[in-house]
Amino acid sequence: MEKANRLTSYRHDKSSARMEEACSYSPGGVHSSIRKLPQDIVFSRTSGGYMWDIDGNRYIDYNAAFAAIILGHCDPDVNQEVFNALRDFDITGVGTNDYEIEVCKKIVTYVPGADLALLCNSGSEATYHAIRVSRAVTGRAKILKFQGGYHGWHDYVLMNIFTKPENIGQKDPLSAGMLAEAVENTTVVEFNDVGAVEKELKTKQYAAVILEPISHNIGCVLPTPEFVKALRDLTEQTGTILVFDEVITGFRHGLGGYQSVVKIKPDLTTLGKAIANGYPCAAIAGRRDLMSQFATAGGPVYFAGTHNGHTVGTAAAIATIRKLEDGKVYHHLFELGDYLQKGLTAVADRLGIPMYIANFGSIFTPYFIDPSFGPPRSFKELLRNDMEKDTAFRLGLLEKGIFSVPRPMRRMCLVAAHTREDVDFTLNVAEDVLRKLR
Ligand SMILES: Cc1ncc(COP(=O)(O)O)c(C=O)c1O
């Protein structure tokens, strides 16, 4: 392991100069809205659990490319599989190939709700297709999502994520230019609110309910067992399609996704991110009768994409899943997650700082809320979080080489390459930063 004391002082001079150049070619210099950071950071290298910038600063990476990296950056086995595949094969644009068949076989083998699977390149595409096929089979327009859930950048779902308190309960689209009809047809209720779901589904006609089975886009908000069971029962009773968006949870929390943990089979599942350890590969999978509606099988629901099933992603997915299959990676991630959660809780207790560290397996989120409230169950409950302290904590960590998105309530992710030494170092730095914040 790289010695923690090799961290340099955190200056970003070279990054600032290069970012200025980036801005002259691209608006804002970054290629996804949430990549803009309070400091200019131009990265130059990634390996295992770390990232480096062009000023020579090293960061322990707890963002893991927004949860896409599960094994570690530049995993040698995954990279080798990709290099080998690309020597002889890129894309044909027609027909299929062994790589696509193997990835879909793995998905169908492991994900309980997957009778069939189709590949695309991003989670946003997968959720778009899930909603389109739901509308096609039900003949209904409305979609139900949950406050705090993120399902990609398209008009059907891009709303009500980090909603301002005064806008909770109202439509909160995240972008200008969204089609009013799309926004109108998406209803938002609080996560874990069975009564609200029941009222909506029993009084209106919904095509689909879409949810992250663990609400990871507001950190780590777990569903109650009654909630997931009620979603399954209510969607069945009302002929509504249940979509588990497992773009984060799929393959990260287990080969079968979170649906195999809660033992609830959704009608459709969307996958992405960790499935290919950060390479672009995503999928929609689900019930045979629903998946057979796609035009690939002669059905009426269009499905296309020049780069769908690209060998870069499929080869990476095959290698990634192969490394997950014996369960050792999950064992390590769950053990390390538990160690970190307990360690950080102990630090907060020692310093008398009210914190609740929510976690599941490799994903954790330190909330600055009184732990006596117990696990948060909805976005509304998370409004108790001390947003200022949360941001200051993350900025303090960042300045000492520990990277998480420096905004409140963002999930943090362990990767298999992280070690106890990384976590111990993190806990020491966290104690330092928190002591100053107290
Ligand atoms: C749960 C969930 N669904 C869908 C998406 C969209 O995936 P992508 O960014 O690959 O389009 C994300 C991205 O963060 C996500 O977290």
Image: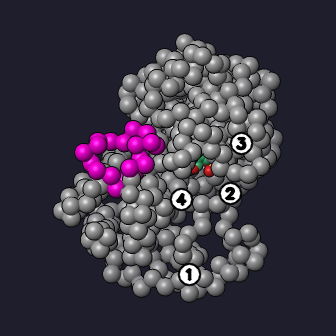
Q: Nearer the viewer, mark 4 or mark 2?
A: 4
CB at disc 1 and ligand 1 closer than 8 Å? no
N-terminal label among 4 and 2: 4
Q: CA distance from mark 3 to mark 4?
A: 23 Å
Residue 86's tag is 2
**Colouring scheme, one of rainbow, by chain, secondary structure, one colour:** one colour
Q: Residues within 10 Å of mark 3 (few under 14, many from 20)?
A: some
Q: CA distance from mark 3 to mark 1?
A: 36 Å
Q: Nearer the viewer, mark 2 or mark 1?
A: 1
N-terminal label among 2 and 1: 1
Image: magenta residue range: 362-384
N-terminal label among 3 and 4: 4
Residue at horizontal 44 percent and vertical 35 percent from the top: 258
Q: Which residue is mark 3?
A: 155
| Front-most of residues 312 and 367 | 367
User: What is the secondary structure assignment of the residue under circle 2?
Assistant: helix
User: What is the secondary structure assignment of the residue under circle 1?
Assistant: loop
For residue 183, side relative to residue 82 (left or right): right
Q: Residues within 10 Å of mark 4 (few under 14, many from 20)?
A: some
Above or below, 271 against 194 in this view is: below
Q: Which residue is mark 4?
A: 65
Indicate the position of residue 421 as horizontal and vertical percent values: 29, 67
Q: Residues within 10 Å of mark 2 (few under 14, many from 20)?
A: some
Residue type beneath disc 4: Ala
For residue 71, side relative to residue 116 (left or right): left
List the single residue furthest toward the top: 237
Indicate the position of residue 131 as horizontal and vertical percent values: 68, 31
